[in-house]
Image: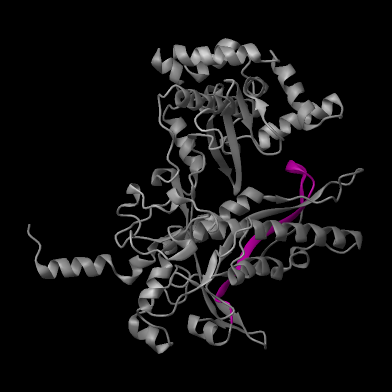
Amino acid sequence: MKLTTDDRRALSESYFSKSRLAEHHFRSFNSFLEHGMQDVVTEKKVIETDIGDKGDVPPIYVELGNIRVTSPRVREADGSEDILYPQEARLRNLTYSAPLFMEMSILQGRGDHATVLDKSEIKIGRMPIMLRSNVCNISDFTPEELIEIGEDPEDPGGYFIVNGSERVLMTSEDLSPNKIIAEYDSRYGDQIQVAKTFSQRRGYRALVLVERSRGGILEVNFPSISGFVNFVTLVRALGLERDEEIVKRVSDDPEVIKFMLENLEEATVQTHEEAIQKLGSRVASGQGRNYQLKRATYIIDRYLLPHLHQSGFSDEDTRIAKAYYLCRMAEACFELALGRRAPDDKDHYSNKRLKVSGDLMQDLFRTALNKLARDVKYQLERAHMRNRNLTVSTVVRSDVLTERLEHPLATGNWVGGRSGVSQLVDRTDFMGVLSHLRRLRSPLSRSQPHFEARDLHATQWGRICPSETPEGPNCGLVKNFAQSMELSQSVPDSEKLVHELFSLGVNRLPGFAELNPNAVSLEEEAS
């Protein structure tokens, strides 16, 4: 069927409507309100205290439940509450925010013997609300109703109002987490091969490096340990002991096996116990043997490839999975050395991910909730010392969470030391507003050349506008989305997806058959 001019005009108007121009902000923020906030609360789950740790007194702690957000409201001087509209927030220098309520229980004792001292749903603070999001008071208003309350019907929304100022969250560009990237070390040309991954879980991001030195020996670096650890030592500490098993997990290619044999000959430990002891002497030098073993186990469980820590699996299975992942990273180094693969292009858009409003707000909310948890712990312990009744209403101060949410939005200084994340909306003209809502920024320093990062990359075709970028030091680092760009969203709960795949028969972890008798291992399937 041939499209007429009117059909094309109608299609164009529908595609480039105001609801689509900032759609990536709406979808992301709505997902945060529906799933992200509850996920952060579920991660925290319990606020521990020091009450009852010693003696026969049962421990007292706080259990967190469901969280919900209402529509934006304003509390007047006489104590009454009324619906708050954006124009009123602008004129009165208010924050367009909505009350947050969460179920909290104060318990004493553990397990079935726990006694509920108090349980209620209480206001824990206020959440800044994005204009035109699902909980915004004007999200379903008609143009006539918008005009009546002083709003522009053509305003696209997608920004916040904090202390009367309109603030937009800049979409942030970053390297893809939990993905192996192989490259040469820039300091030594093509003599040293490096495989790295940004392992990310629950807001924590850890850079793990597997490096093949000029002598051909593999070494691993990860947070909380100084310098590099021998690859074979670390893999044996994780549970892969036998030489044959280590080589098999890396590769069955004869050239790669020859490289691995060199590493095995240089290994100074042969058993799991020796490897853990050697690692413990590195991370807890001068301490007792038992403490060294405990510290080494804690570090590899917490800081090494944290994204592989899946609920429902034992610590032993998780460590084996980490060993397999390190072997895959080692294989990437060897393939690079043999010329079997080209170095990964960090500027290729398949190796990048974008953090939109909802992702940024989830990082901020996680930090704010931790601050609230510390304050609740302090208030609970102080009330217990003064022999007061322990109630939820007396231990929660709502201004703690509110301040930690509003201040970064007002200043742009975000968690993780980032600045300029929140910016004043450019109201020079209407096109300036649309441009600002569809802008993204790179985390790279503006003072460094970064020539390749600033260049137009072929994979930006259809995604990034080739023309709209500022002059000067921000050139190529601050970009804008193309008109026809659509931003896909990540899965809200990746662990459910993983378990769904395992239930269909995928199995890479030994011992998983105990959790799921119907699962078939890859080795059994191949045989």
Q: Nearer the viewer, residue 395 or 204?
A: 204
| Magenta run includes residue 218 | no
Q: Residue furthest left?
A: 2
Q: How many marks?
A: 0
On the image, the x and y values in percent for residue 391 come to 78, 63
Residue shown at 43% from the left, 26% from the top: 505
Residue shown at 70% from the left, 69% from the top: 398
From the viewer's perspective, is 404 left or right of 454? right
Q: Nearer the viewer, residue 68 or 20?
A: 20
Q: Nearer the viewer, residue 480 or 387?
A: 480
Quarter of the N terminus within the rendering = bottom left
| Magenta run includes residue 106 | yes
Residue 490 visible? The answer is: no
Instruction: Identify the image quadrant of residue 464.
Output: bottom left
Instruction: Identify the image quadrant of residue 154.
Output: bottom left
Residue shown at 45% from the left, 51% from the top: 451
Q: Is residue 364 above or below residue 46?
A: below
Quarter of the C terminus within the rendering = top left
Q: Is residue 83 above or below residue 341?
A: below
On the image, the x and y values in percent for residue 292 come to 80, 28
On the image, the x and y values in percent for residue 218 come to 59, 23
From the viewer's perspective, is 275 left or right of 416? right
**Colouring method of the image:** one colour
Q: Nearer the viewer, residue 444 or 405?
A: 444
Residue 63 visible? The answer is: yes
Magenta stretch bounds: 94-115
Q: Is residue 501 above or below residue 400?
A: above
On the image, the x and y values in percent for residue 503 come to 45, 31
